[in-house]
Image (cartoon, rainbow, N blue to C red):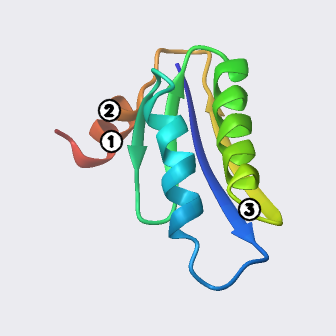
Amino acid sequence: MIIAEFTLTPLGKGVSVSKYVKKAFEVIKNSGLKYELTPMSTVLEARTLDEIFEVVKKAEEKMLEEGALRVVIDIKIDHRLDKDASMESKKKAVLGK
């Protein structure tokens, strides 16, 4: 699996961004990919980079449709080929559970 952490930051219309984030999160929930929402980012798990990039792209487009004038996108990707990795396996490696 490929694990990606990403943040979409809408800019340009006031300080509160929750209305944009809510709309983008609907895209993530409906993507069919495994995800974890954190207070500062979202983590996705997918089989291909295309799946990840497609969800990020659609979420960004949703923010723009909602009126955001600018969106900054940060993505960190862990594409491990030597063994099967998942969000759960990474947490277990640290937490020992």
Looking at numbered disc 2 in the image, what kind of residue is underneath it?
Answer: Glu
Query: Is 94 situated left or right of 11 in this image?
Result: left
- Residue extending farthest to the bottom is 15
Residue 67, numbered circle: 3
Looking at numbered disc 1 in the image, what kind of residue is underneath it?
Answer: Lys
Mark 3 lies on a secondary structure that is loop
Cβ–Cβ under 8 Å for marks 1 and 2: yes
The residue sitting at 69% across, 35% down in the picture is 58
Residue 2, numbered circle: none
The residue sitting at 34% across, 30% down in the picture is 89
The residue sitting at 68% across, 84% down in the picture is 14
Give the x, y percent position of residue 13.
73, 78
Cβ–Cβ under 8 Å for marks 3 and 2: no
User: Distance between the Cα atoms at labels 3 and 2?
Assistant: 36 Å
Mark 2 lies on a secondary structure that is helix
Give the x, y percent position of residue 66.
68, 56
**Would you name the residue on which mark 1 appears?**
91
Looking at numbered disc 3 in the image, what kind of residue is underneath it?
Answer: Gly
As drawn, 80 above or below 59: above
Quarter of the image that includes the C terminus: top left
**Would you name the residue on which mark 2 appears?**
88
* Mark 3, other Cα within 10 Å: few <14 / some 14–19 / many ≥20: some
Q: Please tell me which of labels 3 and 2 falls first in the chain.
A: 3
Give the x, y percent position of residue 17.
58, 72
